[in-house]
Structures are given as C-alpha cells and as structure tokens.
Image: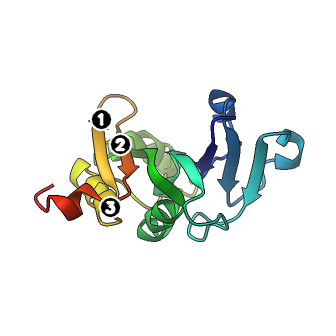
Amino acid sequence: KNGNICDLCCGSGQYRAYFEDYNYIGIDMYDNNFKKKEKKGVKFLIESAECISLKNESIDFIFCSAGLEHVVNDQKVVSEIARVMKPNSYGYIAVPSKVSRLYEFPRIIYCYFTKQKIFGHGYHYYSKKSIVLLIKNNNLDIVKVYPETGFLALNWITFTKWKKSLRSIIPAI
C-alpha cells in the first residue's frame, strides 16, 4: 500500500474505492454499517472529526468531501487535520459555497406548504476567502482553490503540510 489516507466525515465510505492503493481509514460520527465494509487495508472509526484518535503526523493524504460543513467547530476539525497530517503530505476538502444556499429555497418552500420541519444542510457555508483563511490559520499551505458556482456550488481546495511552512519562510504568502 502507498501510505495512509483518512476520509474524514466519510458518511457511508462511498469514496473508499478511489483509494484502493492506500490503507484507508474512514472516520464518521455515525456508524454506517462499517463492520461489514472493513477488510484488509480498510478501517472505519466512529468518532467526532473534532477529536480524531489517530496519532500525530500519521496520515499521508486527507480527504474530506462534503463533511466540514456538518461539524459544529470547523476550526477544531481543521486543527485536527493539521495535527494528523505527515510533513509534506496533501489534503483535499470540498465544501458548499455561500451560493449553494440558493438551492435550499425550493426545499424551504416545499416544507412550508407541506408543514414539514425545515432542516438546514449544515452549519457552515464558505466563501473562497473564508475557506482559505480556515486552512491557512492552521499552518497549512494552499496548493489551489477551485471555486465552483454551478449546480453544486462548491469550493474545492487542495492544501499541503510542509516540514516548514512556506509562510514562516516568506511571510507575504
């Protein structure tokens, strides 16, 4: 295997097939029938992303797609991401942009007329600036931000953890 990948806020673990060359560790707060999905090189942990039980600097790649918006303390989660990432490792996060709130409007109308309770999508929506600041405030370096304002209205971001942060060498970054 080519190292350890952590799929944070993994839901059902649906992305694990993309990482078959890695030791896969899926983490989610809710048990999604994980015992039946575990096998050699595939492990699931049922725990909060705000307090990850993995050792410091033990992960080669962090993957968090459509999960960060569902945690209460996103600052704590990104701090945990930085803690478990190995030096010179990379990560990927996809989060809903502030534009994606527009897509809740039909659901709100439907719930109003059917007298159903309205549940929001998550706790957080992100502008490009807010997700970049969240990453940088945890001494992670941005590789690229891919804002998407189409149907999915996501901000995708790749980042890295260098042995010595580029910002500590060149403060203007």
Looking at the image, residue 25 sits to the left or right of residue 144; the answer is right
Tag 3 secondary structure: helix
Image x and y of residue 98, in percent: 30, 49
Residue to which mark 1 is pinned: 146
Question: Which colour scheme appears in the figure?
Answer: rainbow
7 to 75, vertically: above or below = above
- How crowded pointer 1 is (Cα within 10 Å; few <14, some 14-19, many 20+) is rated as few
Q: What residue lies at 19% left-to-right and 60% top-to-bottom?
A: 169
How many numbered badges does the structure rendering display?
3
- How crowded pointer 2 is (Cα within 10 Å; few <14, some 14-19, many 20+) is rated as many
Q: What residue lies at 56% left-to-right and 69% top-to-bottom?
A: 50
Q: What residue lies at 33% left-to-right and 63% top-to-bottom?
A: 139
- How crowded pointer 3 is (Cα within 10 Å; few <14, some 14-19, many 20+) is rated as some
Front one among 120 and 109: 120
Point out the tag, 1 or 3, that comes first from the N-terminus: 3
Q: Are marks 1 and 2 in contact (CB under 8 Å)?
A: yes
Q: Which mark is residue 157?
A: 2
Point out the tag, 1 or 2, that comes first from the N-terminus: 1
Image x and y of residue 142, in percent: 29, 48
Real-space CA distance between mark 3 and mark 2, rounded to the nearest whole angstrom: 11 Å
What amino acid is at disc 3? Answer: Leu
Point out the tag, 3 or 2, that comes first from the N-terminus: 3
**Residue 93, image quadrant:** top left
Tag 2 secondary structure: strand
Real-space CA distance between mark 1 and mark 2, rounded to the nearest whole angstrom: 6 Å
Looking at the image, residue 85 sits to the left or right of residue 159; the answer is right
Q: Farthest left residue?
A: 172
Residue to which mark 3 is pinned: 134
- Can residue 120 be seen from the camera position used here? no
Q: Quadrant of the N terminus?
A: top right
Image x and y of residue 167, in percent: 21, 60
What amino acid is at disc 2? Answer: Ile
